[in-house]
Image (spheres, helix red, strand yellow):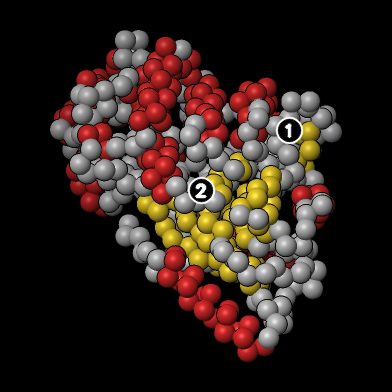
Amino acid sequence: MMLLRPVALPVLWLLLTATTTLFTQCTGDSTAAASPPTATVAAIGEPIRLLISGSMLGRLEPCGCASGQLGGLARRMQHIGERRSYDVLLEGGDLVDTATELDVLKFYTAVQVLTGMQHPYDALGVGPKDLELPLDEFSAFLAGAQVTAGDLESRREDWPARPFVEKDVRGQKVRITSFTLSLPAALQGDDSPVRLLPPKAAWQRALAGAADATLRILMLQGTDTTARNLVPTLSPPPDLVVCCDAGQLEPASQVEHIGKVPMVFAGIRGRVLLEASLLRTPDGSQVVVDLVPLAGSKTVPGGGGDPDVKALLLAHRDQVKQDRILEHMARKLPTPNGAAYVGSENCKTCHPTAYEAWTRTPHFRAWDTLVKAEADPTRYGWPVTHYPDCVGCHVVGYREETGFVSAEETPQLAGVGCERCHGPGSSHLQNPAGNKMGLHAGTPASVLCIQCHDFEQSPDFVYSDRWAKIQHGLEPK
């Protein structure tokens, strides 16, 4: 995907400042322009520079399946260290995507990087997926961090989130809050230790005691539509809304508006960060944005990145292997059709042509690619064959009953075999005519493919082109 980069921020701000100065000279009053009736327009000053991201969803770094992948905490922190010019660092929440044992370790690692290293973040939001984690770990890992969840209340004494965080930037107060807007099922009900506040009440609580001149930033977990319905109900209005909409894969290079309130999108997975300059003018808040694709270095071995963060990520991966997370997470979910996995060798007798076609495809060698990558320090050099995120796309039935556990325990399920697309085959093996095989869980073929070949792992994936490389069918009659 080609990312368009707008005109450099300093240039646009010079234009904006010149326009504002001319307006002031003509009117003789910098507050003469229309402004929200509930807020006093602040004097024009130097813009606040922000770096925005959100919805990391457990992507601590690119998986490495494709060349040129973007993102990763090591590259992010290197970029921050090199620029050294950001006034406020914002992360919108949903650091993880699920609540497995692996996600607990990912959450801990991400929090260490974002709060405990050389450039700590000024505000971390809380997403609904974060709240699916065990609350003991959630609270312990975030203790002392700059965490805000304006619409959440908790009776836990160790609750780490506060209604807002505030920072003084060259005499300008910046107040930041986040709205989670929903709770996971486990936290719903009268006995829940966490309660969701109505947005209006949460906004008033977050702004309690704030001066009129304070810049107000709202990070919001919800869709574009949710934001557009909610923001007009908030008074005084935010100066900037950061929308963490999972449907917006990358940040947009243009600022959108809800009335006069500027809104930007954080994107997902931390692939592309968003630089933003925020300034309140007589006409309301003005925001200029620029995109920061986190590409790896083409000259530094391993792609570059902050060495301290890379060391922490390596320690995380080693911990995953040491704790045998791969095996612990295996076989926790039922198979969709209730049958058991049997391995591709059991398909060979009745489907020799299809089996032969499979042995000529990269799917057949999928496990070997991980083994070779693990042994090659120029590619990985870390225990990738023990990391669940990587293993899941290179084997059959991982996490499901009777599915892959490890190369030692279930070698017949290593590689992307027949049952990865067609589902567990034990019932079909026992009664081929009565239990015909289709696609796994009735999922359309193209949807099955993008479970692994998504926009990041296979950015150039086209189903019709790829199907030709693995094409097979029923035996000729």
Q: Quadrant of the C terminus?
A: top left
In this image, 367 relative to 224: left or right?
left
Q: Quadrant of residue 210?
A: bottom right
Find numbered disc 2 in the image and state the secondary structure of the residue it sits on: strand
Q: Nearer the viewer, residue 241 or 130?
A: 241
> Looking at the image, which residue is at 84% across and 33% down?
190
Q: Which mark is residue 53?
A: 2
Spot occupied by residue 335 in the image (x, y as percentages of width and height): 48, 26
In this image, 144 relative to 353: left or right?
right
Q: Of marks 2 and 1, which one's residue comes earlier in the chain? A: 2
Q: Residues within 10 Å of mark 2 (few under 14, many from 20)?
A: many
Spot occupied by residue 43 in the image (x, y as percentages of width and height): 67, 69
Q: How many marks?
A: 2
Q: Which mark is residue 187?
A: 1
> Looking at the image, which residue is at 79% across and 25% down?
157
Is 308 above or below relative to 212? Answer: above
> Looking at the image, which residue is at 55% across and 34% down?
115
Spot occupied by residue 25 in the image (x, y as percentages of width and height): 62, 86
> Looking at the image, which residue is at 42% across and 70% down?
11
Determine the CA span between mark 2 and mark 1: 26 Å
